[in-house]
Image: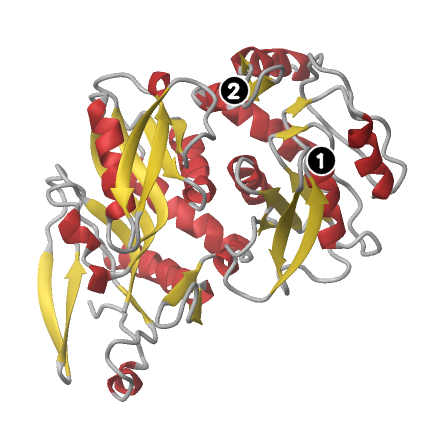
């Protein structure tokens, strides 16, 4: 098997950067081109599965919608449940919801009641972490005082993220230089968590 | 070989016919172009209903294993009445995803069907198609191509408008994701009227991709999506009535 660095280098090379999307000044990290390379996609999943195997992870939660692409294959590899975290009014059963800040306004994330049990160990997955607002909301939904231990994302990372000080660590496969200024609003989202 | 049918069929008879109560289980074996399998169709009459049962020409051990897996998968799907609005019976696959064995079996059943069929593209419809498509794509070594709501994909896209019950929606795909001549399957969790799948087929065919089959976990036969797909094959694990 190729080394971890080789695989990550290959994965990084498949990610397309699109300037000024969704608006001027943003450099969008497009993982759809990674998905067009079956070897790179497989390596991405393998790297996460290798990390979490044998760690007693019973829940992989994925954030709609690109977290639905990476979470389920990792869940399948680990023999864990997959729990979708969705935009409002998509989940049909009883839900708990968490509101979180966007650059302008707020959004809401929902999870089915009963999908996870107290004491389960969970991993939260998404394609990218930028300000961390989405992931913070996901962590809150699972319950900061329950036995979840780790929060991980794949494969891209923005340079905005500082340290998490509470029971969460962050794995990203690929680091990119951000092309826009870190905003203080981004840090305050982390502070609230 | 007796196909698996609902044990609660008699109770279904006493319910208002327009409200489905149980998933019935069917299995299709025949893959278009396969000469090995033969299809025998039998009508099984239970009261006023007629249930078409298909059995392929497989060894009985293989078939019972496949039927066992489908029975188990069906049992994990939660039915939620009056969602998203009164009168709709919602087939909730999130409970299937909470059962790792059932989820794995679901993927395996599609992979067994499509591996070695020269499929190079698995297209998945946002958002629940993103859950089932990628694991199948990974297992058969194909690309995964997301078909998305408008303005989500950052690159150059082609768009297809399609009808909803009220109004229309738009589906987009990156133009560079696929090449002319590639063989594709389209995946979603469920097919109802077939409107979404039709839009997906049109998107792929506009760029000269050959859509070999549409594949879903669940079909709602009463909504006639299969007819709407016309001559495009549809494969499902479960028909819910």
Disc 2 marks which residue?
Answer: A40
Residue A129 image position (x, y, % from top left): 68, 29
Q: Is residue B22 left or right of residue A14?
A: left
Q: Can residue A71 be seen in the rendering of this structure?
A: yes
Q: CB under 8 Å between callouts 2 and 1?
A: no
Say few, some or many: other residues with alpha carbon within 10 Å of mark 2 (under 14 / 14 to 19 / 20 or more). many
Instruction: Tell me where residue B162 appears, x and y as whole percent.
Output: 26, 42
Residue at image location 70% in from the left, 17% down from the top: A175
Residue A56 visible in this rendered orientation of the protein: no
Same chain for mark 2 and mark 1? The answer is yes
Q: Quadrant of residue B125?
A: top left
- At 81% from the left and 54% from the top, the residue drawn is A147
- Quickly name the residue at label 1: A152
Residue at 77% x, 23% y is A160
Q: Give the vertical position of B68 relative to B160 (above or below).
A: below
Is residue B166 left or right of B78 when viewed as pictured?
left
| Quadrant in which the N terminus of chain B appears | bottom left
- Number of the front mark, 2 or 1: 1
Single out the residue that lies furthest toward the right: A165
Residue B210 x %, y %: 20, 27
Residue B2 image label:
none
In the rendered image, residue A8, in percent from the top left (x then y), is placed at 63, 16
Q: Is residue A17 left or right of residue A184?
A: left
Q: Which residue does the image show at 84% across and 43% down from the upper left?
A: A192
Q: Does dot 2 land on a helix, a strand or a loop?
A: helix
Badge 1 element: loop
Label 2 or label 1, whichever comes before in sequence order: 2
Viewer-proximal residue, B77 or A103? A103
Q: Residues within 10 Å of mark 1 (few under 14, many from 20)?
A: many
Q: Chain of mark 1?
A: A
Q: Is residue B49 above or below residue A92?
A: below
- Residue A178 sits in quarter: top right
């Amino acid at each position: 098997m190729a080394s971890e660095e080789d695989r990550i280098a290959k994965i990084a090379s498949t990610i397309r950067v699109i300037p000024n999307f969704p608006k001027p000044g943003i450099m969008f990290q497009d993982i759809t081109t990674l998905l067009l390379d079956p070897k790179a996609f497989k390596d991405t999943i393998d790297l996460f599965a290798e990390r979490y195997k044998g760690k007693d992870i019973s829940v992989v939660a994925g954030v709609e919608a690109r977290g639905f692409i990476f979470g389920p294959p990792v869940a399948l590899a680990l023999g864990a449940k997959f729990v979708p975290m969705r935009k409002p009014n998509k989940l049909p059963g009883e839900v708990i919801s968490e509101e979180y800040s966007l650059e302008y306004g707020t959004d809401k994330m929902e999870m089915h009641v009963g999908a996870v049990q107290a004491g389960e160990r969970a991993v939260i997955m998404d394609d990218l972490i930028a300000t961390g607002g989405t992931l913070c909301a996901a962590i809150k939904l699972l319950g900061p005082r329950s036995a979840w231990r780790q929060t991980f994302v794949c494969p891209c990372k923005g340079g905005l993220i500082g340290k998490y000080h509470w029971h969460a660590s962050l794995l990203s496969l690929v680091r990119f230089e951000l092309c826009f200024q870190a905003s203080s609003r981004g840090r305050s989202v982390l502070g609230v968590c | 070989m007796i196909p698996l049918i609902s044990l609660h069929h008699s109770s279904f008879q006493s319910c208002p016919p327009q409200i489905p109560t149980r998933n019935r289980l069917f299995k299709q074996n025949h893959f278009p172009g396969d000469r090995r399998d033969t299809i025998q169709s039998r009508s099984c009459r239970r009261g006023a209903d007629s249930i078409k049962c298909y059995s392929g020409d497989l060894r009985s051990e293989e078939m019972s294993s496949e039927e066992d897996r489908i029975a188990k998968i069906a049992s994990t799907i939660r039915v939620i009445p009056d969602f998203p609005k009164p009168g709709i019976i919602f087939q909730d696959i999130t409970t299937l995803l909470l059962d790792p064995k059932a989820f794995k079996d679901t993927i395996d059943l599609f992979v067994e069907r499509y591996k070695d069929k020269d499929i190079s593209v698995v297209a998945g419809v946002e958002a629940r198609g993103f859950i089932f498509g990628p694991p199948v794509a990974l297992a058969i070594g194909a690309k995964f191509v997301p078909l998305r709501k408008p303005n989500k994909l950052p690159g150059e896209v082609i768009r297809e408008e399609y009808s909803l019950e009220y109004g229309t929606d738009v589906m987009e795909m990156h133009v560079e994701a696929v090449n002319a001549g590639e063989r594709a399957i389209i995946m979603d969790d469920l097919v109802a009227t077939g409107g979404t799948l039709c839009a997906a087929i049109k998107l792929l065919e506009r760029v000269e991709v050959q859509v070999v089959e549409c594949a879903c976990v669940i079909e709602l036969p009463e909504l006639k999506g299969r007819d709407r797909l016309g001559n495009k094959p549809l494969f499902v694990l479960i028909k819910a009535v």
